[in-house]
Amino acid sequence: MARKIFIAGNWKMNNTVAEAAALVEGLKARAGDVGNVDVAVCPTFTTLASVVAGLAGTPIKVGAQNVHWAASGAYTGEVSAAMLKETGVDYVIIGHSERRQYFGETDETVNQRTKAALAAGLLPIVCVGETLAEREAAKTEEVVKTQTEGGLAGLTAEQAATITVAYEPVWAIGTGKTATPEMAQEVHAFLRGVLAGMFGQAVADQIRIQYGGSMKPSNAAELLAQPDIDGGLIGGASLKADDFFGIVTSA
Ligand code: PGA
């Protein structure tokens, strides 16, 4: 089953409008190298509109980093799916471990956000992953299964086929410690089994599972060569166009 590789940059809370414009120039200069890879960048809310405009006409798509489940109302600090859609983004990251750790994100709120994103025609990138303590306690599979089943509960098979799951071991994020390709593949294969249990094997075979956590040009090729690793969610290395495209071209 051929799944198209999907490389997404998670800019996190980085880049002013001016800084984003400079990075967009760098990305545009490399846009010819996209090849047969789906590529997206996920800037902050304040830079979405300018990045969408800057990348228009290139194959590089844009995503947001969070979305609220309600259509509108008294949710200070939040942004709705329709508001994101209006800016021209295609994707949205949901349930990143930093949201879970610092902002009280739960599997239930991940599920609500995912459903709202799908209803608005956005393509969710739903993040799961274990902490170091959970891995050391041999709870990795239990944790990612619970997060996946909770986050994707109630989706139709048709909806599920459009989502991306990002496996991001928390201990590998921003630490320089990458899961070995074998360790990552083991969890990705397990996750595909969880997805098959939820939506059937044919749908599970369509869902792209990205790896995230200190992916960089020097380790991307061996990770992406694994049969169940279908792309990457890139933090630090997505902030420089050449590093980001070093990963894209290794795919
Ligand atoms: P990193 O972040 O590539 O800087 O480890 C990945 C992520 O958190 O999405």
Image (tube, rainbow, N blue to C red):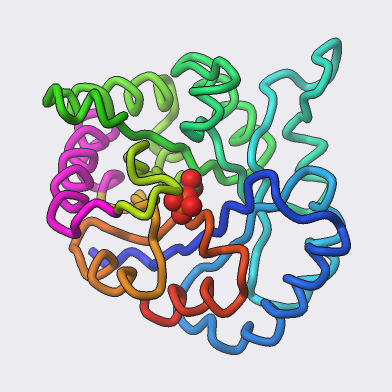
**Residue furthest to the top:** 74
Task: Give coordinates of residue 40: x percent, y percent.
Answer: 59, 62
> Would you say residue 162 is visible in this rendering?
no
Tell me what residue is drawn at x 22 percent, y 56 percent.
Answer: 228
Task: Give coordinates of residue 105: x percent, y percent.
Answer: 54, 19
Q: Which residues are magenta?
A: 178-204
Tell me what residue is drawn at x 69 percent, y 87 percent.
Answer: 29
Tell me what residue is drawn at x 63 percent, y 27 percent.
Answer: 116
User: Which quadrant: the N terminus?
Assistant: bottom left
Task: Give coordinates of residue 242: x percent, y percent.
Answer: 56, 80
Question: Would you say 209 lies left or right of 100 here?
Answer: left
Question: Would you say 210 lies left or right of 198 here?
Answer: right
Question: Would you say 177 lies left or right of 25 here?
Answer: left
Question: Would you say 159 lies left or right of 133 here?
Answer: right
Q: Quadrant of residue 20?
A: bottom right
In the rendered structure, does residue 188 fall within the stretch colored magenta?
A: yes
Figure label count: 0
- Secondary structure predominantly adopted by residues drawn in magenta: helix
Task: Give coordinates of residue 174: x percent, y percent.
Answer: 45, 48
> Would you say residue 245 is visible in this rendering?
yes
The answer to which of 39 and 200 lies nearer the viewer is 39
Tell me what residue is drawn at x 19 percent, y 59 percent.
Answer: 181
The answer to which of 198 and 101 lies nearer the viewer is 101
